[in-house]
C-alpha cells in the first residue's frame, strides 16, 4: 500500500497560528471563500510565499514517511507526528495567503527540496517543541495513572502524554475528533450518529463563537460528548502548553470548559493536550483543579499527512486491524477525514468491531 503523502493544496480549516515566516501576520479564521484582491502584490512576494510552501511541504512529506515507518508507541513516532501536525497548520496558513494574494490555489513543487527537511524547518520544529539534541530514542517515563497513561519525555526535554488501552476489550473502539467545531463537524457528527458510534469531539475555544456553540449543541443532540482541547491549539504561535505557565494553562482550559457549559448546560469531563504535549504537573493540576480526565490516543490516523480520503481510509483500517482495538484520533475539520470517517464507521460495524462510549475513559482513569 502506498503511504506516500498526497498533500493537495486547500484553503479550508485554517488554524490561526504560524511561526517562522518573515513578518507573517496572524490570520483570522478562514473565510468561506477567498476574496481576490483588486491589485495583485508584487510577483516577488508571491514567489517567496511559494518557495516557503515548497520548503515546508517537503518537510511534511519527510515527517510523514518517518511517522509511518515508526511504531506508534515509540518516542520517534511522537516526535514525527507532532512535527507533522504543526507543519500541516503552517502549510494551510500559507496556502490561504497564496490563494488570497494571487487569486489561485498553488500546487507545490516537491522536487525543489526532494522530500527533505531543511535546516531552517528542523530548527523551527525543534524550537516549537523544545526538542533537545538527544537521540529520539532516549526517553524517561513518569506514571500518571497505572494502566491508563503516563508522561514520556522525548529527546530528554519534551513531555508527551502516552495513552494505554488495556481497559478495552478486543474489538472495542473509542472514536475521537480534534480541532473543531468547524463547517464539516455537523456532517461528521451526523454520520457517527447514523452508524451508532458515539464519539468524543475535542473543541477549541477560538471556534466557540455563536455558530460554534450551535454546532456543539448539534453534536450533543446527536448523542456525542465534548472535550476540552485548548483555545488557540495551545498558543497563537502553534507551541504546545509547555510554553505556558501552569496558571495560564488552567485559566485557558477553564475558560474553554465554561464556553462548553454555556452551550450545553454542562461542563466537559475530558481534556486532550494539543500534539499530546503536556507536563506531569499540568496533567495532575488539570484533573484536580478542573476535573478533566486526560485523554491521548493509541491509533493516530495521521490524517494530517494526506488529503486523499481513500488513502486515509485504507491506512486507518489497516492500523485498526493490526491493533485490534484502540482509541482512534482523527480531525473533524478536514474533508478527507470527514469522508474516511463515514466509511470507517461502516467498516467497523461490518467487521465485528464495537464503538464504545467515551465514558469508558473516565471509568478507567478513576478505576471504576
Image: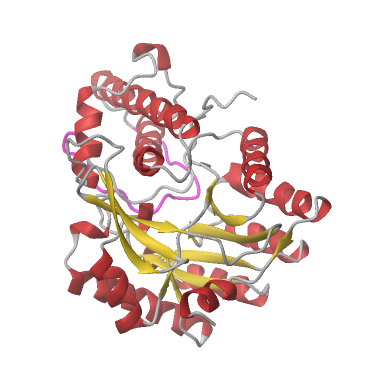
Locate the C terminus and report the quarter of the image it occupies. Answer: bottom right
Which quadrant of the figure has residue 63? top left
Residue 328 locus on image (x, y percent): 57, 54
- Between 363 and 94, which is closer to the camera in this rendering? 363
Asked if residue 299 is positioned above or below residue 313 in the image, the reply reads below
Quadrant into which the N terminus falls: top right
Q: Is residue 20 visible?
A: no
Question: From where the camera sits, is residue 200 visible?
Answer: yes
Q: Position of residue 213 (x, y in %)?
A: 50, 73
**First to last magenta residue range:** 22-38
Query: Would you say the magenta stretch is mainly helix, strand or loop?
Result: loop
**What colour scheme does the image use?**
secondary structure
In the current view of this chain or complex, which residue is farthest to the bottom? 265
The residue located at (19%, 37%) in the rendering is: 134
Instruction: Check if residue 315 falls in the magenta segment.
Output: no
Image side of residue 14 versus residue 20, left or right: right
Q: Quadrant of residue 150?
A: bottom left
At horizontal 69% and vertical 44% (from top left) the residue drawn is: 321
Residue 97 vertical position relative to residue 221 in the rendered view, above or below: above
Q: Is residue 25 magenta?
A: yes
- Expressed as whole percent of the image width and height from the top left, the position of residue 198 reads 67, 68
Place residue 118 in its image quadrant: top left
Residue at the image position 21 percent from the left and 42 percent from the top? 131
Number of labelled discs? 0
| Closer to the camera in the image, 245 or 70 | 70
Q: Nearer the viewer, residue 41 or 309?
A: 309
Left or right, 246 with reference to 197: left
Looking at the image, residue 246 sits to the left or right of residue 201; the answer is left
Residue 121, horizontal then vertical, whole percent: 25, 30
Amino acid at each position: 500500500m502506498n503511504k506516500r503523502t498526497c498533500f493537495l493544496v486547500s484553503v479550508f480549516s485554517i488554524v490561526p497560528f504560524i511561526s517562522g515566516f518573515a513578518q507573517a501576520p496572524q490570520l483570522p479564521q478562514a473565510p468561506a471563500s477567498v476574496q481576490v484582491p483588486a491589485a495583485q502584490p508584487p510577483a516577488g512576494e508571491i514567489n517567496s510565499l511559494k518557495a516557503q510552501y515548497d520548503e515546508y511541504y517537503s518537510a511534511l512529506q519527510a515527517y510523514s514517511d518517518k511517522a509511518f515507518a515508526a511504531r506508534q508507541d515509540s518516542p520517534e513516532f511522537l516526535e514525527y507526528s507532532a512535527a507533522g501536525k504543526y507543519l500541516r497548520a503552517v502549510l494551510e496558513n500559507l496556502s490561504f495567503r497564496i490563494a488570497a494574494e494571487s487569486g489561485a490555489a498553488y500546487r507545490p513543487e516537491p522536487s525543489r527540496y526532494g522530500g527533505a527537511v531543511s535546516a531552517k524547518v528542523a530548527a523551527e520544529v525543534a524550537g516549537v517543541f523544545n526538542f533537545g539534541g538527544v537521540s529520539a530514542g532516549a526517553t524517561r517515563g513518569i506514571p500518571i495513572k497505572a494502566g491508563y497513561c503516563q508522561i514520556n519525555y522525548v529527546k530528554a526535554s519534551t513531555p508527551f502524554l502516552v495513552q494505554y488501552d488495556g481497559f478495552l476489550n478486543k474489538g472495542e473502539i473509542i472514536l475521537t475528533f480534534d480541532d473543531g467545531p468547524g463547517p464539516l463537524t455537523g456532517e461528521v457528527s451526523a454520520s457517527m450518529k447514523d452508524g451508532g458510534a458515539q464519539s468524543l469531539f475535542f473543541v477549541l475555544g477560538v471556534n466557540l463563537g455563536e455558530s460554534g456553540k450551535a454546532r456543539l449543541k448539534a453534536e450533543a443532540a446527536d448523542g456525542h460528548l465534548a472535550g476540552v482541547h485548548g483555545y488557540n491549539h495551545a498558543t497563537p504561535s502553534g507551541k504546545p502548553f509547555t510554553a505556558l505557565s501552569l496558571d495560564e494553562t488552567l485559566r485557558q482550559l477553564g475558560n474553554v470548559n465554561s464556553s462548553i457549559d454555556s452551550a450545553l448546560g454542562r461542563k466537559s469531563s475530558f481534556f486532550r493536550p494539543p500534539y499530546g504535549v503536556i507536563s506531569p504537573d499540568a496533567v495532575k493540576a488539570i484533573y484536580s483543579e478542573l476535573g478533566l480526565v486526560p485523554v491521548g490516543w493509541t491509533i493516530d490516523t495521521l490524517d494530517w499527512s494526506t488529503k486523499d480520503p481513500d488513502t486515509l481510509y485504507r491506512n486507518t483500517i489497516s492500523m485498526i486491524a493490526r491493533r485490534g482495538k484502540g482509541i482512534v484520533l482523527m480531525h473533524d475539520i478536514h474533508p478527507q477525514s470527514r469522508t474516511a470517517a463515514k466509511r470507517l464507521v461502516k467498516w467497523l460495524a461490518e467487521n465485528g468491531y464495537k464503538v464504545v462510549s467515551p465514558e469508558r475513559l473516565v471509568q478507567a482513569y478513576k478505576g471504576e
